Image (spheres, helix red, strand yellow):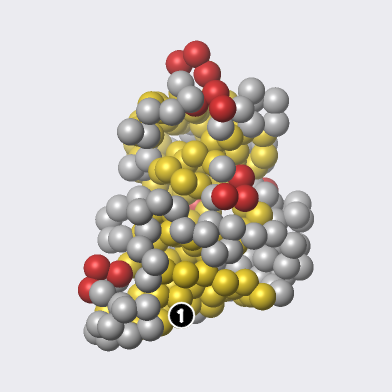
Amino acid sequence: QSVLTQPPSASGTPGQRVTISCSGSSSNIGSNTVNWYQQLPGTAPKLLIYSNNQRPSGVPDRFSGSKSGTSASLAISGLQSEDEADYYCAAWDDSLNGPWVFGGGTKLTVL
Amino acid sequence: EVQLVESGGGLVQPGGSLRLSCAASGFTFSSYWMSWVRQAPGKGLEWVANIKQDGSEKYYVDSVKGRFTISRDNAKNSLYLQMNSLRAEDTAVYYCARDRRVRGFDYWGQGTLVTVSS
């Protein structure tokens, strides 16, 4: 069982906006920033969002992140077929289990 | 171009040992924290261990403490993971990643598969 909680699946049609949630606690999301990773089928993960809402160079602005309290969200607007992937949230954890904890991942299906 | 290339994975019996390597290029290796992250077949990501630039600080997930040892050789631009007393639940693809701390893991290798089975 993962320290951070994500829905196992999400879906949307091309052009739609979808959001993926990530719930944690005061020792991780509540006191540290959140990062998001995209893992396309059969490939290594890729950093999508860092420090809650920052996009690395090359990541389209269709991807955005936010955080409030002990929860965070990833939003994808203008959904495209190539966005079909697994998405993971991660945060630094101040407890003994740390320092890094991940969510269980959300499989996004583009219908 | 930043590149991370893992090697050393394979099939090992329970209780056995394996040493993973990660060769880094395209950046100043000695300036960055580095991490190992694993992914069991069909499962999610799990951070395993990380190491400070000069090797003076190392951290591990509870499940591998006392069994795994992370190390680095800055002269060889290489990261290592010595895995002892391996268990079936250690079966996973192991990725090395450049660890930017709160800015996340910004570069990943392609991964190396470790299978623990008799």
- Residue B51 visible? The answer is yes
Expressed as whole percent of the image width and height from the top left, the position of residue A67 reads 62, 72
Q: How many marks?
A: 1
Q: List the single residue furthest toward the top.
A: B75
Judge left or right: residue A79 versus residue B80. left
> Which residue corresponds to the image point at 37% horizontal and 71% vertical from the top-left?
A62
Which residue position holds label 1? A19
Judge left or right: residue A44 versus residue A36. left
> Which residue corresponds to the image point at 46% horizontal and 80% vertical from the top-left?
A19
Residue type, mark 1 in image: Thr
The quadrant of the image that shows the C terminus of chain B is top left
Nearer the observer, B47 or B41: B47
User: Dot 1 lies on which element?
Assistant: strand
> Which residue corresponds to the image point at 70% horizontal and 25% vertical from the top-left?
B56
Expressed as whole percent of the image width and height from the top left, the position of residue B53 reads 61, 27
Q: Please determine whether, in this image, residue B108 is positioned above or below residue B6.
A: below
> Which residue corresponds to the image point at 41% horizontal and 43% vertical from the top-left?
B108
Nearer the observer, A64 or B95: A64
Expressed as whole percent of the image width and height from the top left, the position of residue B104 reads 54, 50
Expressed as whole percent of the image width and height from the top left, the position of residue A75 reads 45, 76
Nearer the observer, B16 or B101: B101
The subunit carrying tag 1 is A
Q: Please determine whether, in this image, residue A5 is positioned above or below residue B30.
A: below
